[in-house]
Image (tube, helix red, strand yellow):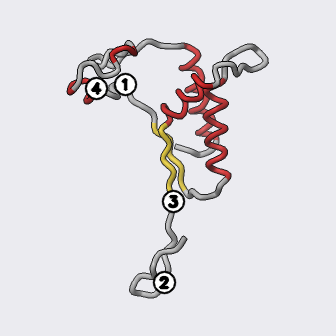
Amino acid sequence: MNRKPPRNGTKQEILNTLLVDGNALFKTGFNGASGVYNRDAVHVGGIYQFITVLRKLLTENLYHQVYVFWDGTFSGKLRYEFYPDYKSARGKDFINGTHPVDESEVNQKLRISEYLEELFIR
């Protein structure tokens, strides 16, 4: 896709950037592929789905840059301040930035981060 030539007559290429909500993509895969295990009987559904969806997007060759964003420690705090019942059933402490930890979830997120580094995706 090309832009209209600037005044000097040269064309500028449009660089497409893919922004990925890492938490949303991971959580969908983690919960949706709850029956996916590796040969050591370790749940890897979040990794499998995350990489599968990302691979599909990348094979379309539409993007020049890819960035994956993850929720931070205090994500949702602003919404919580406006509406205290915001995601109240999830057990997250928006004041202190803590939430219940699922070891499998944490391990899979770390592996995905390592894979993304190897793919030069920041």
Left or right: where 67 falls relative to 114: left
Q: What residue appears at the point 59 percent right and 16 percent down from the top-left corner?
A: 104
In this rendering, the answer to whether 114 lies above or below 38 is: below
Q: Quadrant of the N terminus?
A: bottom right
Precedes in sequence: disc 3 or disc 1: 3
Residue at the farthest right position? 39
Precedes in sequence: disc 3 or disc 2: 2
Q: What residue appears at the point 62 percent right and 48 percent down from the top-left corner?
A: 57
Q: Closer to us: mark 2 or mark 4? A: 4
- Residue that carries the numbered disc 1 in the rendered image: 73
Q: Amino acid at mark 3?
A: Asn
- Residue that carries the numbered disc 3 in the rendered image: 16
For the residues labelled 4 and 1, the Cα–Cα distance comes to 9 Å
From the viewer's side, name the closer residue of 61 and 9: 61
- Residue that carries the numbered disc 2 in the rendered image: 10
Left or right: where 66 falls relative to 77: right
